[in-house]
Image (cartoon, grey):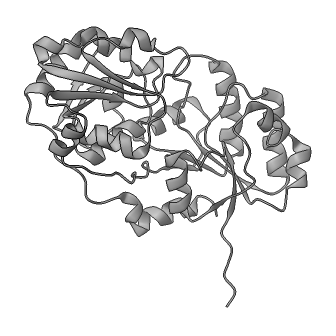
Amino acid sequence: MKTERPIRVLSLPDIHGTNTYLRIWYEAAGVEPVLPIPHRLAEYQRTICNPQWLRAHRDDFDVLHVQWLYAQLPFVAFCRALFTVRALGKRIVWTVHEVLPHDGENVAKHRAIGTLLARLADRVVVHTAYAQAEYRRLFPARNNVHLIGLPDYEVELTPQAAAKARLNEDRFIFLFFGHIKRYKGLDLLLSAFDPKALDAALYVVGEFGQGADDPVRVAQDEVVLRTGECSESDLDLYLSAADAIVLPYRRCYTSAALQRAEQHGKALVLSREVARTMTGMHHHAQVFDGPDHIAAALLAARQGPGGPGPRSFRNIEDALYRAELAALYV
């Protein structure tokens, strides 16, 4: 009996080998990423932004999935590539992680490419109702926008006492983690954090992006700093040890950090910008409006009952969720 081959996806970017979100997404959708492209601007210019390269590989992929827009991509060449993909009879899927750039840079270019993608894409994916509303407000509205939650991660749970012992830590832990960029508000958290008043430690775990805080300034006596790339296992250890997760973002449409924190069932301290992306009511979250209210939210979390505990079920185990992902590529 002949087995039908999976749908072949040309992914921009092609980092599913190192990006957990992309790997889980494509596996759950049952599609096959093809034509691996090194994650460098020159390689994208040579390949995915080159109509000649696309035509040469017309029989090697079925769908172009644009996961992130990069301001560095040459605007005209990328637009020409999108038209070439459609002329070849290929489908286009666009996942809108940032409706507009969080850093406020290259907004006009991002919006221009987004407007074109909104018209050419067969399917547009957003992960939160807030992102969906913002997308419909800013881009041409068609009936091809699909609201699909982020896929749950493969979290490694460790009992909190054991996790703290491995970190040689017995204090209450506030944790800030992820790829650290300026819009994520670490500077606001550092200004508000008072270790003596809170009787707590602040752990900062992640890789510092361009324009983010200076790691030397962050590394104060009361702040435990783990910089650079962090393995999934190590990150889950910090999450298991934490008592509360702090996400003081200035802007947010979707947050994988929030998704992971909720899977671990931790108490949350969130800016209003992050909280509005959540679904349902979360009584374990302390939500603050503006930097002047961060300290009070931290204290409330310190004195509160804690989080609800880890989630036992992953959404990618749901056949309906997997079918919804697979249908995007048909």
Up-down relation of residue 248 to residue 292 (above or below): below
25 or 116: nearer the eye? 25
- Horizontally, residue 123 falls left or right of residue 197, namely right
Judged from this view, the residue extending furthest toward the bottom is 1
Q: Quadrant of the N terminus?
A: bottom right
Q: Is residue 259 visible?
A: no
The front one of 120 and 182 is 182
Along the line of sight, the residue nearer the viewer: 128 or 318: 318
Residue under the point 56% across and 18% down: 210
Question: Residue 6 appears at what percent x and percent y?
Answer: 65, 69
Where's the C terminus, which quadrant? bottom right
Residue 44 appears in the picture as rendered? yes
Residue 74: image location, x then y, percent = 79, 27
Badge count = 0
Q: Residue at x 32, y 52 (%)?
A: 156
Left or right of 303? Residue 164 is: right
Quarter of the rendering containing residue 274: top left
Residue plotted at (23% across, 38% down)? 241
Estimate the x, y position of residue 227 in percent, counting from the top left.
Answer: 43, 25
Going by the image, does 176 lie left or right of 208? left
Q: Is the residue 282 above or below the residue 247 in the image?
A: below
Viewer-proximal residue, 37 or 282? Answer: 37
Residue placed at 24% from the left, 49% from the top?
158
Q: Residue 47 in the image: x percent, y percent?
A: 82, 42
